[in-house]
Image: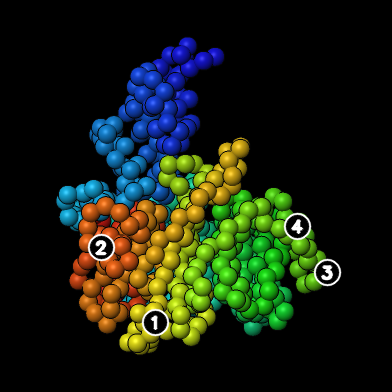
Amino acid sequence: MPFSELNDHVLGEILAHFDIYHVLNFTQVDKRCRRSALSKQLWISLIRDLNSRGLRDSTAGESLEGYTTQELIEMAKYAACGPKTWAPTSRTPPTLIREVSVLRDSQLARTTPVHLLPGGRYLVGGRAPGLFAVWSVATARLVWTYTEPWILWSLAPLDEGDTIVVIFYRREPTQPQFLELVEVDLDTGVSSLQTRVPLPTKYTSASSVHVRGDFLVVVSDGVTSLEALIINWRTEAFVRLQFPVGCRIASWLVSGYLVVTQVDIDDALSCAVYCLDTLRWDSLTDLSDQSADHEHLPVASLRLPTELGEQVDCFATQPYRHPLRRGAFKIMTIVSLSRTARLPSNSLKKLWGKIRRSDRDDNAAQTRAIVYSFILRPREDCGDPLLGALGISKIPQWHSFSLSFSGYVVYFPQLSGDRVVIFDTKPNGRGIKSKDGLREVLSREHRMGFPPPMLGLYSTALILVEGNLVRILYYA
């Protein structure tokens, strides 16, 4: 049946299953379609979908009925583009509209980075060997703590309610190394152990862990190769991806794929995407058996270009759920490059220390950073290439990985100074320009220290850590 024969109610019910990208496209068809696509109830449904996926800051019990359709559309635009007063077309300077403070326990305050969870309702932070905590932003209360000794951690929010799963890489006297997966209900603070996965002795040098849904990933340096171990903990199966000795990788799980950024020994930089459904899985009982290894090829790859003679000091990759396109991800990789002696590391804490020591060196001016971004499209988009066009932005230097989906980055002109600057990595529009052409969005007083200021992944909230106090600044 053609759309022209459907009544407005049925048409609205159909549009409620669309994402924002397709709804906006639907407004271009004709006047009737535009009227249906701009109905208030439809946009309330779309914003609630963003809230459930943690793609905009929301408060408990938030009522959307009091907003106009245009205000609801502006909420979606904020999630995708950042604060309106940060935009290149804004004639109003960056405007602070709200500030929230969370006071942390003194034990967790020392050199402990904090992260604002998607949705903006909770803060998390941890300090090895045995402190990990979650705080409520609205009430500033401590929601949950984990005090068992751990070495590495990672977490992933679940779509259904305020629930997260946290993975810990741990060691005990009776068990050399293992992964522990804990599910936490952030409403009640109640947690439950989901699984423990023992690891063979070859995984004693794990450098990172990651979790998403039923899958866990451990990256470990071996004698003959670098390895990414993927585990499906529900089916008790695994896959090993092996990389040459001397290369460095960063890996993330995103909706049926594993995204791997790789720096070869000759500093060639690339990004590969592996489809989890097409990998050859083996039983976890064979994890110690090296004969279980197979060759696995990516379903898509991109070369990330650098200039001749530049060395990769450090890099990090972050996937972002796309607020406008359900099932799509924006993958952003930030790389620190230099023409001086290499400081190889993919540890942000180590990089921070090295940069602080080298900030006064004459060679510091030869260091720069590049931000690469591309879209990983959903598998159901038949006919589209898996990876979108590569975007490249240059920034003067990189001192911490803190990029928002909308392309804003935190930068410190002088680590010994008292100022933090936010740049727009899209070099266009009004505003103060750096020597690299970047637009300076915001500059404010802040005494430098560790952990450094950060941005929310989607909200573009500025997070400042001042001893025991965490300040979260929201802009219009």
> Where 2 falls versus 383 (above or below)?
above
Q: Which residue is mark 3?
A: 291
If you read the primary sequence from the N terminus, does the residue marked by circle 4 or circle 1 appear first?
Answer: 4
If you read the primary sequence from the N terminus, does the residue marked by circle 1 or circle 3 appear first?
Answer: 3
Q: Which mark is residue 281?
A: 4
Q: Where's residue 370, x and y in %?
A: 43, 66
* SS at mark 4 in the image: loop
If you read the primary sequence from the N terminus, does the residue marked by circle 4 or circle 3 appear first?
Answer: 4
- Residue 122, image quadrant: bottom left
Residue at 27 percent of width and 66 percent of height: 434
Q: Which residue is mark 2?
A: 433
Alpha-carbon distance for marks 3 and 2? 56 Å
The N terminus sits in image quarter: top right
Q: Which residue is mark 1?
A: 355
Alpha-carbon distance for marks 4 and 3? 13 Å
If you read the primary sequence from the N terminus, does the residue marked by circle 1 or circle 2 appear first?
Answer: 1
Disc 1 crowd, CA 10 A, few/some/many (<14, 14-19, 20+)? some
Residue at 70 percent of width and 81 percent of height: 223
Circles 1, 2 touching at the beta carbon (< 8 Å) = no
